[in-house]
Amino acid sequence: MARFDTTGLDTTSLDTTALDTVWTLDKVLHPMRAASFFAEHWERQPCKVSRHDARYYAPLLSVRDLDSLITTTANPSLGRVRMVRSENGRMANKAVPHTTDGIPNMYALYRSYCDEGYTITVDRLDLSWKPVAGVCRSLEDELQHPVAANAYYTPRGAQGFLPHYDTHDVFILQIEGAKMWRLYDYPAGLPLHHETSTLRPEDLAPPRETICLGPGELLYIPRGHVHEAFTSSEPSLHLTIGVHVFRWADLISETIAAVAGDDPRWREALPVRDVAEKPAGMQSRLRELLLALAAKADPQPGLERLSRRLSANGFPLPDGHFCVLDRIDDVTEDTVVWKRDGMTCKVVALPDRVTIHFAGNIIAGPPAIEPALAFVAARHRFTPSDLPDCLEPSDKLVLTRRLIREGLLTFKPVVD
Ligand SMILES: O=C(O)CCC(=O)C(=O)O
Ligand SMILES: [Fe+2]
């Protein structure tokens, strides 16, 4: 599933025992296939997936979850809950009042939602809400691009945002209710991360199409495509899963960062005094360095750095792991162990050690255990005795217990 792999090993982290519970892109897009999505729509054209299963995305989030999400998990100090309303071409943001203990004032949210038509947005559910974190992790592993998710809850007859384009590709999952989406023809190209934009109505031609999204349906909008959304007779809760793609420019700058580590010429200071007088001299040096880079043109070190950026930002999803830690000694060579939800991993073989990376953690061991780590990366579920024989039987148990202690694996302790 990983798009690149430095070791030549199969580091696919999910085997078939896990697939029915994992939100692969095929499952998110069903019945559309991910392969045809990439061939026809990705980065190019919006598309809607119609579905007559209103509860298809219900396992991810529901209106019933919103108050607990807002009060307990959406860290208020990070400003992750917002209120926004648009009317007559003007957009109003309203600060969410907080109690003296720093919790969002729910009464104020009820009022703004019911009486004033404000949309409530909760950002970065991939950091705080386990089912959404699970789908984002799984997509991140499959696509090898960073993935994050926000929720939008809009009352009847209201609009949150003015027409805008996003700088990331979005999968809009209609969770409950319905929303109308206007899509515009507007030449924003493929914007970079910082090029966000809200458009003035006078900059826009009439919408190209209006799409009604019902519960259980999906709309994909590529980055740079202008859109706006509004409700009519029903309220709406949708989840936007954003793919914050790594671009060629990112690969090239990571490649330069990798090369600069190896070649001292890249680490020399720019000329101090002569910059203005001697741009020609700089030009020849710049050309020399870029030609040296082009002669090598090896994508692997840059891809490796991007891959590490992805996994470095992860963290384990809350699943009561301390209960498991307290019973680690119960694990025997026949105990079934498996990856914790949302854990995907990658094995990197270096000359003096082998490492396994997962959700913000890196474990290193001697090169000889590479087949064992590759086995762990490739399987969802196994017993210590299944591990390859590069390890002694007692070491199979030691490695398995270590990977539980480090937070990658779990098991079901026997209740006394
Ligand atoms: O619901 C809205 O008003 C807009 C949401 C949006 O633009 C998005 O999810 O990308
Ligand atoms: Fe948007």
Image: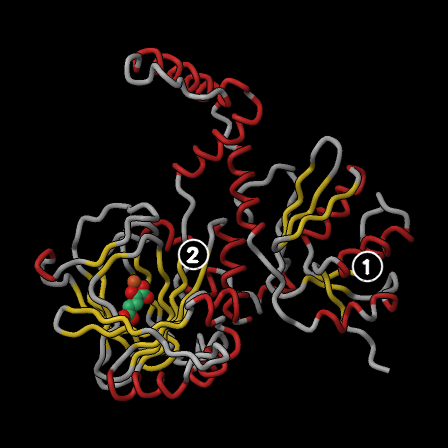
Q: What's the residue at 56%, 27% (across, down)?
A: 261
Image quadrant in which you'd find residue 407? bottom right
Task: Please determine whether, in this image, residue 283 is positioned above or below residue 240.
Answer: above
Q: Nearer the viewer, residue 58 or 159?
A: 159
| SS category of the residue bearing label 1 | helix
Task: Please determine whether, in this image, residue 413 is positioned above or below residue 40.
Answer: below
Q: Determine whether, in the image, residue 21 is placed left or right of residue 247.
A: right
Q: What's the residue at 44%, 76% (across, down)?
A: 56
Q: What's the residue at 76%, 56% (across, down)?
A: 403
* Disc on res. 213: none
**What residue is pinned by disc 2?**
34
Q: Nearer the viewer, residue 355 or 48?
A: 355
Tell me where residue 160 appears, x and y as whole percent.
26, 72
Q: What's the residue at 90%, 52% (across, down)?
A: 393
Q: Determine whether, in the image, residue 200 is placed left or right of residue 175.
A: left
| SS category of the residue bearing label 2 | helix
Residue 30 visible in the picture: no
Q: Amino acid at mark 2?
A: Ala
Sequence order check: which comes first, mark 2 or mark 1? 2
- Dot 1 crowding, Cα within 10 Å, few <14, some 14–19, many 20+: many
Tell me where residue 39 appears, x and y as whole percent.
36, 49
For ligand 1, give the image quadrant.
bottom left
**What residue is pinned by disc 1?**
401
